[in-house]
Image (cartoon, helix red, strand yellow):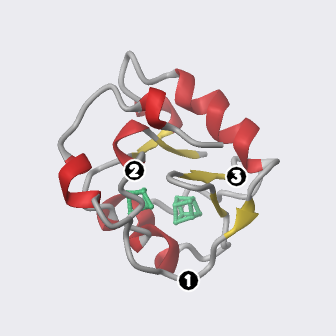
Amino acid sequence: AYVVTESCIRCKYTDCVDVCPVDCFREGPNFLVIDPTECIDCTLCVAECPVEAIYAEDDVPEGQRHFIALNAELATQWKPIVERKDALPDAEEWASRKDKLGELKR
Ligand code: SF4
Ligand code: F3S
């Protein structure tokens, strides 16, 4: 499956959502995840994300591997998002920040 990683946190641009053929994105307050039980590895979402948050599971960078389990966990708790919407208001400010995991709201 594909995995949403840290750079999405507090940005949530949602461009990824529109291209997913199986509607497997799930939405939290300031982050999206991919439901790994539904993702068909089509790759389409990767190029859509302006902050390059999405990776194939095998390619998730060292130091972000914990996002694999986090996507799986939160996908069972959050609701589907099937249409693009406005990014979070201060998305641009947060786009280049690192170490945002502490900012994640569940
Ligand atoms: Fe959806 Fe394809 Fe991205 Fe998986 S890889 S989340 S199926 S757009
Ligand atoms: Fe997040 Fe990128 Fe989608 S910021 S909501 S993974 S377009």
Q: Secondary structure at mark 2?
A: loop
Measured as percent of width and height from the top left, residue 63 is found at 39, 16
Counting residues from the start of the chain, the first of labels 3 and 2 encountered is 2
14 over 26 or under it: above or below: below
Q: Secondary structure at mark 3?
A: loop
Q: Nearer the viewer, residue 73 or 40?
A: 73
Mark 2 vs ligand 2: CB under 8 Å?
Answer: no
Q: Nearer the viewer, residue 105 or 51?
A: 105
Q: Which mark is residue 35?
A: 3
Cα–Cα gap, marks 3 and 2: 19 Å
Q: Residue type at mark 2: give it.
A: Arg
Residue 100 location, quadrant: top left
Q: Which mark is residue 83?
A: 1
Furthest-right residue in this view: 76
Q: Residue type at mark 1: give it.
A: Glu
Mark 3 vs ligand 1: CB under 8 Å?
Answer: no
91 over 83 or under it: above or below: above
Q: Quadrant of ligand 1?
A: bottom right
Q: Which residue is mark 2?
A: 10
Q: Residue type at mark 3: give it.
A: Asp
